[in-house]
Image: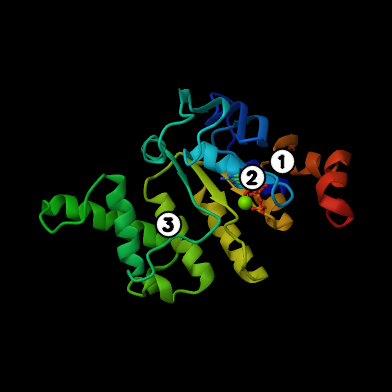
Amino acid sequence: MSAVNSIHPVSTSPAALTLRNVSKSFGEAHIIRGVDLELQRGERHAFIGPNGAGKSTLFHLISGNFKPSAGEILLGEVPIGGLSPERINRMGLARSFQITNIFPRLSVFENLRLGVMQRFGMQYTLWRPISQYRKVTALAEQLLEQVRLVRHRDTLGGELSYSEQRSLEIGMTLASDPKVLLLDEPMAGMSREETDYTAELLRELSVGRSLMIVEHDMDVVFSLCDRISVLVYGQVVATGTPEEIRNNAQVQEAYLGKEVAA
Ligand SMILES: Nc1ncnc2c1ncn2[C@@H]1O[C@H](COP(=O)(O)OP(=O)(O)OP(=O)(O)O)[C@@H](O)[C@H]1O
Ligand SMILES: [Mg+2]
């Protein structure tokens, strides 16, 4: 595990994404309470924690779907806290949601092509210079290969298996060629085999980017990620390498339980 992680380059500064004292309240409910984090360039970072800890909320804050109540979020060195999701996406951050989000009545290729068109702010129209059309098509073909769905090029999104739909969704997320990629439980509902397949795909696709992932599957978290943060009641109670997290007594007690700690 450490051998694989050491191949993946992790540089130190400046961080790809920085969170400083980020908080979010809904009325009297303080859901995210002063989160600090530096996601390094090239790093794969997992967020783990019990249901309701605030993992998805944190992702919503980073991606612009929620506005932070307090604190600072920087993409590279640029503050993004409170900007719209579209702007943050154009600045190089993309995310997937906990629920699969594709167009079921379009083919796999059409889904990817739409993703690429969105990247260039293009509307769907036939009146378009042929050179632009070629560029979009070429990029969509490239994504099709990257997410290993070439054989399903003309299959409708809704007819793919569940795990293939998640691969397609990851491809759509990559259409904007993001520097930072946020994935919220990309393996949820998958079989062991599908989970391992998707983990391998993510390992490939995250090269040259920074990845932040929320995942409940501890095998995936511990083998894929360079560092792990544990979120409990909206606070990061520990951040460290898989080894450090595995051996952290507070984490074992709060979350992992004997099974993983053993
Ligand atoms: N829009 C909202 N208004 C009020 N409370 C909210 C809102 N969104 C989330 N919450 C609350 O915030 C808490 C954290 O939810 P969140 O979905 O971020 O947890 P999570 O760590 O992603 O959980 P899971 O592992 O189940 O996905 C929950 O108690 C939830 O009810
Ligand atoms: Mg969640």
Where disc 1 sits, the SS reads strand
Location of residue 226 (image quadrant): top right
Question: Which numbered tag is attached to residue 55?
Answer: 2
Residue drawn at the location 49% of the way across and 29% of the way down = 81
Question: Which numbered tag is attached to residue 231?
Answer: 1
Residue drawn at the location 62% of the way across and 30% of the way down = 23
Tell me the crowding category of disc 2: few under 14, some 14 to 19, or many 20 or more residues within 10 angstroms, Cα based.
many
State whether residue 28 is above or below residue 165: above
Report the residue marked by disc 3: 171
Instruction: Answer yes or no: is residue 208 visible.
Output: no
Q: Amino acid at mark 1?
A: Leu
* Front in this rendered view, residue 24 or 18: 24
Which of label 3 and label 2 is nearer to you? 2
Check mark 1 vs ligand 1: CB closer than 8 Å? yes or no: yes
Where disc 3 sits, the SS reads helix
State whether residue 88 is above or below residue 114: above
Q: Amino acid at mark 3?
A: Gly
Check mark 2 vs ligand 1: CB closer than 8 Å? yes or no: yes
